[in-house]
Image: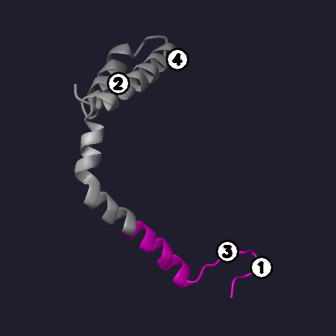
Amino acid sequence: MIPRSGIDRTKEHIMGIDDIVDKGKELFEQNKDAIDGALHSEQAETISDNVLDGVAGFANKVTGGKFEEQIDGVRDTIDKSVGTE
């Protein structure tokens, strides 16, 4: 029986969440080559460059450029993980 709160806290309900997580893990494993390919594509490179440039620019503006070298270093490190360059 579901309590008045409408939240079902039974073991069966919790197991449903575990099943969803397991299915997500299974789908990831089945498609990890495609996911890896997408992360290292030209499109991902363009998008990541735009996002990282925007975030780095904002961070530099907020800090008055005092940490520009560190911010740019973090930006470059992250950029190496996504895209083709």
Q: Amino acid at mark 1?
A: Arg
* Residue named by callout 4: 62
C-alpha span from label 2 to label 4: 24 Å
In what quadrant of the picture does the N terminus appear?
bottom right
Q: Are marks 2 and 3 in contact (CB under 8 Å)?
A: no
Residue 55 among magenta residues: no
Tag 3's secondary structure? loop
| Residue at x 39% of width, y 25% of height | 52
**Sequence-wise first label, 1 or 4:** 1
- In the image, 9 versus 66, the foreground residue is 9
- How many neighbours does mark 2 have within 10 angstroms: few (below 14), some (14-19), or many (20 or more)? some
| Residue at x 26% of width, y 60% of height | 30
Front: mark 2 or 4: 2
**Sequence-wise first label, 2 or 1:** 1
* Residue named by callout 1: 4
Q: Amino acid at mark 3?
A: Ile
Left or right: where 85 falls relative to 72:
left
C-alpha span from label 2 to label 3: 43 Å
- In the image, 82 versus 69, the foreground residue is 82
**Sequence-wise first label, 2 or 4:** 2
Residue 10 among magenta residues: yes
Its colouring scheme is one colour
Tag 4's secondary structure? helix
Which region of the structure is painted magenta? 1-22
The image shows residue 5 at horizontal and vertical percentages of: 74, 74
**Identity of the residue furthest to the top in this view:** 65
* Residue named by callout 3: 7
The image shows residue 62 at horizontal and vertical percentages of: 52, 17
The image shows residue 81 at horizontal and vertical percentages of: 26, 34
User: Which disc, if any, is residue 46?
Assistant: 2
**Sequence-wise first label, 4 or 3:** 3
